[in-house]
Amino acid sequence: MDMTGTIGDSPMIQAIKNAIKTDLLKRYNSEAEKKILHTASALDPRFKGLPFLTVEERLEGGVTEEAASLENERTLRRTEVTAAPEVTGTLEEETTDGPCAPKRKASSSSLLVSLLGRSFTDTEGTAEPKTPYASAEEEMERYCKASSLPLTEDPLNWWRVHEITFPLLSRVSKRYLCIPGTSVSAERVFSTAGDVVTAKRSTLKPEHVDQLVFLQKNLHIPKC
């Protein structure tokens, strides 16, 4: 709904629009909150066009940088994990080498390299591997060109289907689209806990409160 007043709006519609606009302006003032909301909207295939934002407020570049950063962290962790076995293997090779050490057989792969290496392993003229930022930039460009998802569809299911096509952006989308859009469920739990812990039951232990809240929420079990 457009929050700006238009000609022909009834007084009630104008009052509702003003109330919603005033409430939203009070809630989302910090730049950190705006960044989270804008990023989540950019990663939602239903709203990725961001027509409600100015060019300066759009965060395609920020999403690209975050995707590249996550890929760099993943590569670093992978390198640290694979580095440890290499050190152990080197120590074992050093301790087993000697005059009585058994001779190692040449593997078939090394024979192929010695025979056909010049013809099939020549890297001259091949393209250099892309940097994480370049890969993320290409993904963002293809993601923006892809058709938008209808408002009635599930964005999480869209990302599950297109995870192979956009591997870097899909990781970033999991970080933002997992945030619940409402706090109603949490407020209901607090309300139930307030009904359980009354003035006459203020000495209940925390574990007993958890059990009572659980029983209250699961009191009505549907019949099979």
Image (spheres, rainbow, N blue to C red):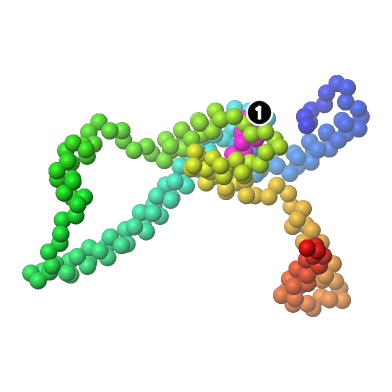
For mark 1, does the 10 Å Cα neighbourhood hold few (<14), some (14 to 19), or many (20 or more) residues? few
Residue 11 horizontal/vertical position (percent): 92, 29
Q: Is residue 153 left or right of residue 193?
A: left
Q: Is residue 43 visible?
A: yes
Q: Is residue 68 left or right of residue 46?
A: left
- Residue 48 colored in magenta in the image: yes
Please determine whether, in this image, residue 175 is positioned above or below residue 58: below
Identify the image quadrant of the C terminus: bottom right
Residue under label 1: 51
Residue 223 horizontal/vertical position (percent): 80, 64
Q: Is residue 31 visible?
A: no
Q: Is residue 23 left or right of residue 144?
A: right
* Residue at the extreme right: 11
Q: Is residue 221 left or right of residue 67?
A: right
Please determine whether, in this image, residue 31 is positioned above or below residue 55: below
Q: Nearer the viewer, residue 212 or 162?
A: 162
Residue type, numbered disc 1: Pro
Residue 106 horizontal/vertical position (percent): 15, 56
* Residue at the extreme front: 224
Count of marks placed on residues: 1
Q: What residue span does the magenta drawing correspond to? A: 43-51
